Amino acid sequence: MGILGLAVALASNVFAYFLYAKTFESKAISSDSRSGMEVTHPEFRTMSSGVRAPLRYSDCVVWNSGRATIFGSDLKSENGIEILFSEAEIFKGPYVQVSLRENKVEVRKHQPGGLSCRFDFLDPGQGFQVSVGYAVPTPDLFNPTFERPKIIGVVVGMPKGITSVYSRGRAIRSFYESYGFAAVLLILFLVANIFSKFELIYALAFGAAITSMAIIGAVALYRAMKGRRPRRLIPLYV
């Protein structure tokens, strides 16, 4: 049983490392967005439809999360990378920050609630942030609900398109829910080994394997959520 436990732990480590290695593909673009509004003194805007709506602010970040340079010619969508705010109208911005001015990022409105983003190139870890203020109709002006902005685009060599960090994190969390259940079973097996007639060396080795498996998995999850996000951005317009 001790040898069987070691084999199971070793297989779990290999699987965890495979997940870690697959965190980054050779060609990938990731996106994330954060939104908020003034809670104590909300701003309101009258939209073109005549509807009065609260003003909301969003910071949308797009970056090269892969291991290969992505060129502007790789964007095959008519509007490049699109940032879409459902049923919204943009009233402030866009304000753009970039990793390098040499990335030649261009952002423009192509519809009341949509932005078109293009660039010359993005090396791994490089990207840009677009900040806007926009109004969205809501049944309750003082307790509104909002949808996350959509960031989409067709890129050569990326059949799955742009990956939302939120979606990626949710998928990996779902995996670790079942993965963690298996780890609990393995830990119970470790405890049984310690208090059984099998040699302690098997139990200790098995425990070390479980520990390393958990560490590799935690690092994979962290890098999937935060890895290679651009950390230093400069204003595009000064």
Image (tube, rainbow, N blue to C red):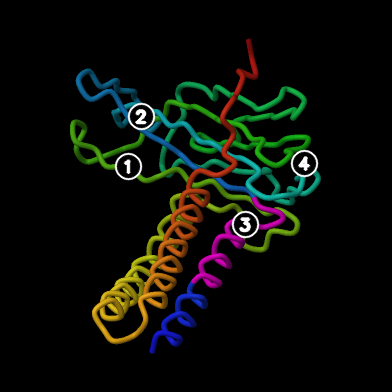
Count neighbours of disc 1 (C-alpha within 10 A) and say few if under 14, some if 14 to 19, many if 20 or more. few
Q: Circle 4 — which element? A: helix
Image disc number at residue 146: 1
Question: Where in the figure is residue 39, as x and y percent of width and height?
Answer: 23, 25
CB atoms at circles 2 and 1 under 8 Å apart? yes
What is the three-letter code of the residue carrying label 3? Answer: Gly
CB atoms at circles 4 and 3 under 8 Å apart? no
Q: Residue at x 31, y 27 (%)?
A: 37
Alpha carbon of mark 2 to alpha carbon of mark 3: how far?
A: 27 Å
Alpha carbon of mark 4 to alpha carbon of mark 2: how far?
A: 30 Å
Q: Residue at x 63, y 10 (%)?
A: 238
CB atoms at circles 1 and 3 under 8 Å apart? no
Where does label 4 land, which residue? 72
Where does label 3 land, which residue? 161
Q: Residue at x 54, y 25 (%)?
A: 94
The first of marks 4 and 2 along the sequence is 2
Question: Where in the figure is residue 183, as x and y percent of width and height?
Answer: 35, 71
What is the three-letter code of the residue carrying label 1? Answer: Phe
